[in-house]
Image: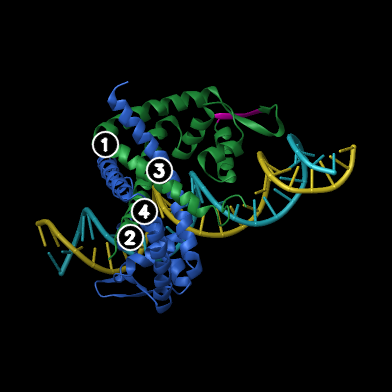
Chain colours: A green, B blue, C yellow, D cyan
Amino acid sequence: MSSLQKEAAAFTDLILEVFQLNGLLLQAGDRLSAPAGLTSARWQVLGVIDHGPATVAAVARTMGLARQSVQQTADALVDDGFVAYVDNPHHQRAKLLSLTTAGRRALRKVEAAHAAWANRLGASLAPGLLAAALEGVRAARLRLEKDLTPEEGARET
Amino acid sequence: MSSLQKEAAAFTDLILEVFQLNGLLLQAGDRLSAPAGLTSARWQVLGVIDHGPATVAAVARTMGLARQSVQQTADALVDDGFVAYVDNPHHQRAKLLSLTTAGRRALRKVEAAHAAWANRLGASLAPGLLAAALEGVRAARLRLEKDLTPEEGARET
DNA sequence: GAACAGTTGACAGGTTCCTGTCGAATTGAC
DNA sequence: GTCAATTCGACAGGAACCTGTCAACTGTTC
């Protein structure tokens, strides 16, 4: 067995770990945001427009999701009063998503819970581990993006 | 800012990376398995029962998913002829999922494509990087599992 | 200013995962 | 052997993501 195949095995193992960790993170996110009446997906959208109002398409690009996925989440957030569409001076049709008072209050609440949770978990892991994991996962992501995009954009055809 | 909060920030960054990497991996998996008439989800089920026939519930536990999610995938695989239910000597009602000839052929095809792909990507990343990422992500997953399970099983209530 | 490509939101439909509930089968305690 | 707890598949419904298509708007090019 060449060392090349050994790296491939590590890559495959990493995939399985990422799948499982992803599931757990969504679960944890839902638990953190539920008290504020949110879910992982909705919380993330609120987090993006906390920096300033943005269109649905812009939020989707920031999050790396399809435009239509964010559209659904955004409409649901509007229905629940966490977010409102405000006029966009640069575009007549593409309104801006903006936090309402209720949305800001919910976001602050989740952020407080998230900070406590992240501090707790971050502190309980060996110091270098997280940094190393972050570096490796980022490298894998960048490599994968490069591998995936050339032969067609895949998303947003 | 204490070093504790710094670790928490690394943890938060890792979360975002994992979300994005997860999405890319699913995309890559679909692309690898599409030529064989499969998807990521279906390929993974076939991979589990390749070691030997198993019930839907057993496959779900192995994959860390809800039983009903695998049930749907399994039924779809049966419809497409990749898998068949065979009698279970130990359980009258819980039949065993077993690969058909077509299923085995499709699985081998995807595995070949996967091996080539993993070799290519694994070789193009710095050797230590993957190992470090794997170690860190695994530690985070284990820690998160411990954090999540105590206060209720969440899945399969 | 008219035609053009690119972007955007609306609408429709599909996949994969989830939860909750039910009856049937199995297992274990007594 | 009997009975309760557990496990299993079936069924129903929902959440979050995806793709594809369309018309309206923007900015550019001529």
- Where does label 2 land, which residue? A4
In front: mark 4 or mark 3? 3
The crowd level at tag 3 (other Cα within 10 Å; few <14, some 14-19, many 20+) is many
Badge 1 is on which residue? A128
| Residue depth check, mark 4 versus mark 2: number of the one nearer the observer | 2
Q: Amino acid at mark 3?
A: Arg
Give how far apart the Cα atoms at labels 1 and 4 are.
21 Å
**What's the CA distance linking mark 3 and mark 1?**
15 Å
Is residue B81 found left or right of C29 in the rendered image? Answer: right
Q: Does A26 appear above or below A117? A: below
The chain to which mark 2 is attached is: A
How crowded pointer 1 is (Cα within 10 Å; few <14, some 14-19, many 20+) is rated as: few
Q: Position of residue A106 (x, y in %)?
A: 46, 27
Q: Which residue is mark 3?
A: A138
Percent position of residue B97, x then y: 35, 70
Tag 1, which chain?
A
Residue A83 shown in magenta: yes
